[in-house]
Amino acid sequence: CPFDEWFSAFLKGLSRGPPGCLSALRSLRFPVVSYNCSSVDAEGAQSLSAIICRGLVPSLSDLKLTLSRTGVEGMQALRDAFSSPHVSALRRLKFSFTPRHPEALQSASNDEFDRSYGDELRILSVAFSSGRLCRLTELKLKGIGGICDIRALCVGLGSGQLTSLRTLSLKRVQFTSGICLDGGVMGCRALSEALVVEKVPALGTLEVVKSQLRTEGLRALVEGWEDHNPPLLRHLNLRNNMLTKYATDPLLSLQRAKTMPSLECVDLIGNPLDEEYVLQWGSVDNFRYPGGDIDLRSDCGMYEVD
């Protein structure tokens, strides 16, 4: 893709600068505009790693990258960058992925799609476990595959090194795809083990959006939290999944057991809930549901919809 080549050349040029030459740079994003073909390639990742490891961007606090074609070699370079002492200013990271092959978009049962980024995410998890990202407050991932990818990610999330993380956003994460057709049970169990208060003590917002999450998966997540010390969540955003009316049972159980007393808002907008059934529990103040008349932007925060 010509955008990839341009960005790689741009980063290569920047990497040749003297230390501190970009000392005021706080935010970097590629692609700037969403193009299906655009991704940081291996060469671009190596140049970006050199920029960070040489201390050229000591103030970089916000980094957003598409890593669909970065590959193992490129991800190893990024691992080295995020494990270096020069990332102490990073506060916000967003990584986007897309299936390697267009036909994967047409078939959720494609095994290659299910395992598409497991190797890369295992490498990335090493960086999450390094302790160098202990000041990171926001982590967003979009477009990773099924259970293999989720388990690889959870190794880093559960390392206990992301102690300042306040927001974790998982969008278009295929909890139900490929060889994993259990409604997201295995993926949610892995999440419940990684996201406990001892490991992510500052986590206040969890978003699992547009991720084919089913009621069985949500039940596994809640049951896992009941067996451990759950994070001190204030906002749980479950918009645009595949949760049915029965999803309310584990959520209400979570509330009644006071397992998560800090929870202020559960957002279920965009799920196929039965309206008559919802009316039975719609009076619970901290639940937002289809047809609700409460301004979600003021109560649950402004969520991205991409």
Image: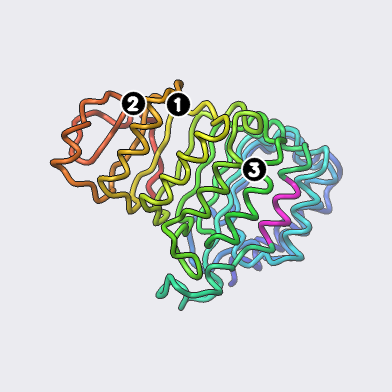
Q: Secondary structure at mark 3?
A: helix
Q: What is the distance, in whole Å, between disc 1 and disc 3 at their CAs?
A: 19 Å
- Which residue lies under the disc numbered 1? 234
The quadrant where residue 3 appears: bottom right
Of badges 2 and 1, nearer the viewer stands 1
* Left/right of residue 146 with respect to residue 92 in the rendered view: left
Q: How busy is the neighbourhood of tag 3: few (under 14 within 10 Å), some, or many (20 plus)?
A: many
Residue 299 marker: 2
Labels in figure, total: 3
Dot label at residue 157: 3
| x and y, in percent, of residue 177 in the image | 46, 66
Q: Looking at the rendering, which quadrant does residue 291 occupy?
A: top left
Name the spot of residue 50 as percent of width and height, x first. 81, 52
Contact flag, marks 1 and 3 (Cβ < 8 Å): no
Residue 24 showing in the rendered view: no
Q: Magenta stretch mostly in which secondary structure?
A: helix
How far apart in space, not on screen, are marks 3 and 2 (Cα)? Answer: 27 Å
Residue at point 17% right, 40% down? 277
Judge by depth and name the residue closer to the eye, 60 or 214: 214
Q: Are marks 3 and 2 in contact (CB under 8 Å)?
A: no
User: Residue at (52%, 76%) from the top-left corner?
Assistant: 101
Q: Answer whether labels 2 and 1 touch (C-beta < 8 Å).
A: no
Residue type beneath disc 1? Arg
Q: Assign the N terminus to one quadrant of the image.
A: bottom right
Residue ID at (73%, 65%): 72
First in residue order: circle 3 vs circle 2: 3
Q: In the figure, residue 96 lies in which quadrant?
A: bottom right
Q: Magenta residues, as a range?
A: 120-127
